[in-house]
Image (cartoon, rainbow, N blue to C red):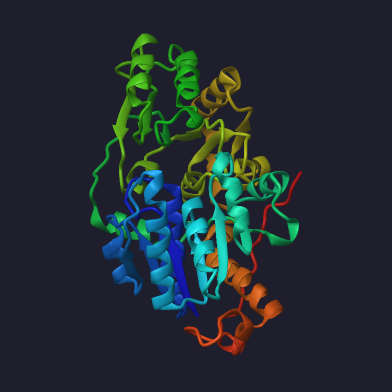
Amino acid sequence: MKILHLSNHCLQAGDGIVNVMVDLACGQSKQGHRVLVATGGGEYVPHFEKHGVVHITLKQRPLPWYAVPRMFWQVLQLIRRERPDVVHAHVMTAVLSARFARLSQRFLLVATVHNEFQRSAVLMKFADRVVGVSHAVTEAMGRRGVRKSRLRTVCNGVVGSTRRRAAAVAGLEAATLLRPNVVTIAGAYPRKGIDVLIRAFARIADRLPDAQLYVIGDGPARRALEALAESLGLGRRVHFLGFRANTADYLAQTDTFALASLQEPFGLVLAEAREAGCAIVASDVGGTPEVLEHGRAGWLVPPGDVASLAHALGTLLEDGERRRALAAAARANLDWLSVDRMTHAYLDVYLDEYRGAGAGQRNAGGADPMVSLENVPASRHPVRPARR
């Protein structure tokens, strides 16, 4: 099968959309598919090449509205030249560009909705299949008018990621964290609730005078968050480390991992924290309960609730036995969070459409006629956490 992924960029900047796309493309290449990724470029280009994925550079930088036709045209030209069986779009502009190309080309258009809270996400409905990265995202897209017959759910995977393995091997960081500690890995954006986490940490700071808070990630709100920590008298105990490519070093030294998001479609970093065996506290919002198996693999607190978050953090820092038990629970049942499972689940999405419509109708004379499905790797269905 020939698969073309479209997104804005492939920068190594902690972007969950990029991280999932990189892992998926490399996983599909490992399965034996011909995989292309078209973006504006970034640090992951060599990683693609190492894993047999062809990267094609597009002019994907922010463009004025009058340049949109040019963007559509370059995607059309790419699809005409490469004749993919599947075009997999990871952002709204990619969906619209590919939909334009469908006026003259035949292929399956799949869109993954990574951030359903964005108003523009509703435009993902123009794809043949709209995939939510969690059940919460899929349900939200249904409420926004996407037909149920077009919706699918494929939870993100991170266990076994070649991307994370490469960052660890590179050894770019030699982190040394003071302990006991609370660590969060999140972009400095309002929806990540880092201000809530800092206020919660302030409530337990006096009774835990040695505790430290580490904020790993960057973004436009960083200065305001640093000012908040200073105003609460925590300037020397809240450490802003900025973006770090190799988060494994930090997770290995984490006593309690916290994610205080106000909006969180999935929470890829929670899967990473689970793999590292961290005791986790996170907001009960969006896809987070699914990643934490509805409280079995982490402590869920109401989003924006400073008091509840402070109670959870304080309890885990003071009660080593409870913290270790929660860490052990986090490490259990990780198969459903693997890249391999995610890759096979997306293959199911692709093949379901072809089994229904017939490959010859979808891509007459195209790249890889999909009439011989027996040569496709067997599907491995995801083990989804049960709902309460």
Q: Name the residue located 66 percent from the left edge and 48 percent from the top edge.
A: 141
Query: How many numbered discs, if any?
Result: 0
Horizontal side of residue 166 vs 376, given as left or right = left
Q: Position of residue 99 (x, y in %)?
A: 54, 62
Percent x, y of residue 363: 56, 81
Classify 92 as above or below 371: above
Position of residue 14 in the picture relative to residue 176 (left or right): right
Query: Is residue 47 rendered to the left or right of residue 121?
Result: left
Q: Position of residue 197 (x, y in %)?
A: 48, 24
Snapshot quadrant of residue 22: bottom left
Residue closest to the far front: 66
The residue located at (57%, 43%) in the rendering is 265
Taking the spot 67% from the left edge, 73% from the top edge, the residue there is 352
State the image quarter where residue 286 is shown.
top right
- Can residue 380 be seen here? The reply is no
- The quarter of the picture where the C terminus appears is top right
Q: Nearer the viewer, residue 65 or 308?
A: 65
Outermost residue toward the right?
388
Examine the rendered structure and indicate whether residue 134 appears above or below residue 129.
above
Q: From what the image shows, is residue 59 above or below residue 52?
A: above
Is residue 89 among what the camera can see?
yes
Task: Answer above or below: position of 24 versus 291.
Answer: below
* Residue 205: % across, % down: 43, 15
